[in-house]
Image: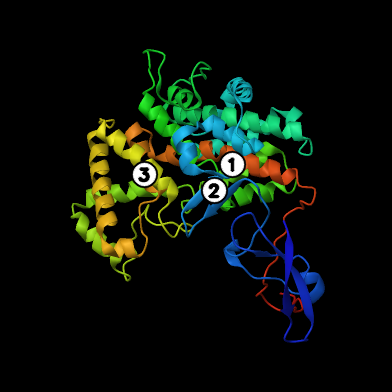
Amino acid sequence: MPKDSVTLTDNRTGKTIELDLLSPTCGPMTIDIRSLYKQLGYFTYDPGFMATASCWSNITYLDGEKGILEYRGYPIEQLAESSTYLETCYLLLHGELPDQTQMDEFEYTIKHHTMLHEQLLRFYSGFRRDSHPMAIMVGVVAALSAFYHDDEDVHNPQDRINAAHRLIAKMPTIAAWSYRYAQGLPFVYPDNSLGFSENFLHMMFSTPAEKYSVDPLLAKALDVILILHADHEQNASTSTVRLAGSSQANPFAVLASGIASLWGPAHGGANEAVIKMLTEINESGKPLASFIDRAKDKSDRFRLMGFGHRVYKNFDPRAKIIREICHEMLANGQCQNLEHQKLLDTAMELERVALEDEYFISRNLYPNVDFYSGIIFLGMGIPLNMFTVLFAVGRTVGWVSQWNEMMGDKESKIGRPRQLYTGSASRDYEDIKP
């Protein structure tokens, strides 16, 4: 990256320093402040890192103002339309789209890492039957570090890729089994004759007693959702993965930390919150208009979930893609559950109002990817507590790609954020005894 500089003057002392100005491929110019403390003795204060670049990365670029999301330079719209999730995984991991030979080898490798060690079956039985699937995922993924010691040299590029392959391949099995365990259903082993998304649906919903055929539309919808969630720059869970990985922890523990971060309702639980909101609206017996009015009332704490985005100030580009799939599923009558259908009807009416009401339009409060993904999962028959689990399955490749990139950076250091201390000044201890 070509460098320029900016001049910074300390008004208290008159001292002037030059800070390098970094030019990214795309996006805002960035001031390199690494010498700020050494030269002036100052820290910077930026809660939530809203104006701080915590790292460099070649993987994902997004522009919230323009509604742009790109993986390795490829627009998300093109990948969702023409690629597959596994091809997108290859792209994120290796930086380029594969040729046919590379793709065949990659698919073979992933398919032959989908099995879990049999002793992990006992690990599942240690959880309560009503355990949240995300709690199971955190535990099981972390436990993988007890089974795969050969891939834990984080400084070995091939070990890192081997660990990435294992995680991408095994995450759907771990996720499906967390659901099966909670339902008291027998575990279904992976079927390597099926595609990635087909295999997951097979492990989720098939039974030994009946023949199960995966609906092609549902498999395609899931594959697109996984592509859309594969990476999203330096979000909370990805930053967690990078911070945990900076200590040179093993990759399975590092990914478990990302899953834990994703579990938060402000991050990966947003699509679950959408369905809870729709349920609240339906069960209230009140007209939808009353909830629209409440959302517009600044004094009312009620908010419409699944509208607007912290980063995207225009329309979420992922929402445009997934909206078409959502409407196609509903048009094909995928949902057979009456209660679910009522929720879907409410969602579609809410979407219509939001896209036509000037209040929402003027504030760019358009339906986002969480709004539509929640509706699609509901139509698939995926239970509410599995929504964030599906997010984790899709985001796995983003986490391991970001971790692999960081571990290959010779300048990478253990994360050590600073703080603005506001506690008591130095004081002397006083004995409680008189």
User: What is the CA distance from the residue labelled 2 to the residue labelled 3?
Assistant: 17 Å
Q: Amino acid at mark 2?
A: His
Residue identified by numbered label 3: 372
Q: Amino acid at mark 1?
A: Gly
Asked whether the beta carbons under mark 1 and mark 2 sit within 8 Å of each other, the answer is: yes
Mark 3 or mark 1, which is nearer the start of the sequence? 3
Q: Position of residue 315 (x, y in %)?
A: 40, 54
Q: Amino acid at mark 3?
A: Tyr
Mark 3 or mark 2, which is nearer the start of the sequence? 2
Q: Tag 3, which secondary structure? A: helix
User: What is the CA distance from the residue labelled 1 to the residue labelled 3?
Assistant: 21 Å
Looking at the image, residue 115 lies above or below residue 414: above
Q: Residue 103, located in which quarter of the rendered image?
A: top right
Residue identified by numbered label 1: 398
The circle drawn on residue 232 is: 2
Asked if one can make out residue 400 in the rendered structure from this viewpoint, the answer is yes
Whether residue 22 sits left or right of residue 352 in the image: it is right
Whether residue 263 sits left or right of residue 103 in the image: it is left
* Residue at 61%, 68% in the rendered image: 46
Q: Position of residue 287 (x, y in %)?
A: 18, 55
- Crowding around mark 1 (Cα neighbors within 10 Å: few <14, some 14 to 19, many 20+) is many
Looking at the image, residue 342 lies above or below residue 220: below
Q: Position of residue 68 (x, y in %)?
A: 49, 52
Q: Position of residue 173 (x, y in %)?
A: 53, 27
- Crowding around mark 2 (Cα neighbors within 10 Å: few <14, some 14 to 19, many 20+) is many
Q: Nearer the viewer, residue 283 or 107?
A: 107
